[in-house]
Each structure stands twice: as C-alpha cells, then as structure tokens.
Amino acid sequence: MWSLILNATIETVYMVGIALALSAFVGIPVGILLVITGPRHIKPMPLLHRALSMVINVGRSLPFIILLVAIIPFTRWLVGTSIGTAGAIVPLTVSAIPFMARVVESALLEIDWGVIEAAQAMGATTGQIITKVLIPEAVPGLVLGITMVAVSLISYSAMAGAVGGGGLGDLAIRYGYQRFRGDIMLITVLVLVVMVQSLQSFGSWLSARLNHR
C-alpha cells in the first residue's frame, strides 16, 4: 500500500510541476501583454486587449472535467495518449494558462502607477519598464498567485484520476473507491491536504520574504 501511495504522490508532483512550469511559460507573457495593452497603460492596444481578455475568459469558464474530455483528441495527437501522467499534463496545462494570465494581470495592476510614470519620465523603453519595474515590483504578488495556481493544479490532478490520469486521484478512485479500501482513500486525502498546506505555507513565507515595501 505504501509503495502505491508513494508512486502516486510522485506522479502527482510530476504532473503538477510540469503543468505549472508550462503554464507559467505561456501565461506570464500573456498576462504581461494583457496589462500593458490595457487602456491608459504603457502600450494601449484596445483590439488586442479585448481579444486576449475574451480568450482568457473563455478558457477560465470551462470546468476542468469538461475541458479534460473535450481536448482528448488534441491530447492524443500531442503526446500519443490521453491517459496516465503524460495524458493529464496537457489538459492541466491548458486549464492553468488562463488562470496564470489573470493572476499575473492582478499582480501587475497592483503596482503604483507613479513608479511606472517615473520610469517613463527617465526615458525607459517598454521592455525596460517590463523587466526593471513591472516584474520586480510584482514579485511578491506573483509568488502568491503562482502558489494559488499550483494548489488549483493539485485539485485538478485529482480530478484527472477520474479518467485514468494517474496520481493520487487515480489511486483513490481505483483502490479506495472501486475496491472499497477506506484506508487508502483516507491516506490519499491526508497526503493531498499536507501537500496543499505545505505549498501554501511556503508560498506565503516566500512572498513575505520578497516583499520589501
């Protein structure tokens, strides 16, 4: 039993880690673009801003379990399978990208506009404002936001177990529910709770350490 739980925990950490990294790779630039193209920001582009916002809203409005099933053909085309950890990473990443973009947008919009104006007055370019002002100033908020995305991905990875996605969710369904093993179900829930609490505590601690305001 402990071997099953250990392997399932490793699979969950693997799925969440890869999906978080991929969603950050795509979602952070999209979130930055969403902010700077907004009205009265450093590079206003109303059409692009509205298009990005609409796509993100559509992505966030889809329940994960529906998205998981809806993109099975795409998942199979991309990774060759729709089950197991490899098959779960694709829908996890797709579901997290819009969430990540909104988290980045929220963190960047909290920055005092006076700091941005000061950078503009000193002749900073758009790229310099993004890399030297927006991102450094938003780091504490970004850490909290990314932590929130990671916690959501842990929850989504458990849902992916309903369709053979692997990890703790799959273990809880196949062994805990279908084989009536209440002990495995209980331990799986406890492991998930510990993972979420540990991750949230670490994210809050790191955000506080990085906040120099």
Image (cartoon, rainbow, N blue to C red):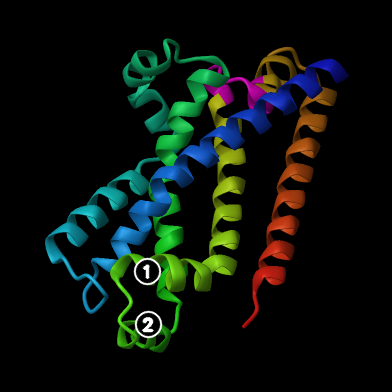
Reply above or below: 55 against 49.
above
Residue 56, visible in the rendered structure = yes
Where is residue 192? Give x, y as percent. Answer: 73, 39
> Residue tagged by mark 2?
119
Q: Which residues are magenta?
A: 161-170
Say whether residue 162 is magenta: yes
Q: What SS does tag 2 mark?
A: helix
Q: Locate the C terminus and report the quarter of the image it occupies.
A: bottom right
Q: Nearer the viewer, residue 174 or 203?
A: 203
> Of residues 38 and 167, which is closer to you in this image?
38
The residue depicted at 29 percent of the width and 69 percent of the height is 126
Q: Is the stretch drawn in magenta largely helix, strand or loop?
A: helix
Q: Amino acid at mark 1?
A: Gln
Is label 1 in a helix, a strand or a loop?
helix
Give me the disc on residue 128.
1
Q: Position of residue 56 (x, y in %)?
A: 31, 50
Label pair 1/2, CB-CB below 8 angstroms: yes
User: Visible in this render: residue 1?
Assistant: no
In percent of width and height, residue 125 lies at 30, 72
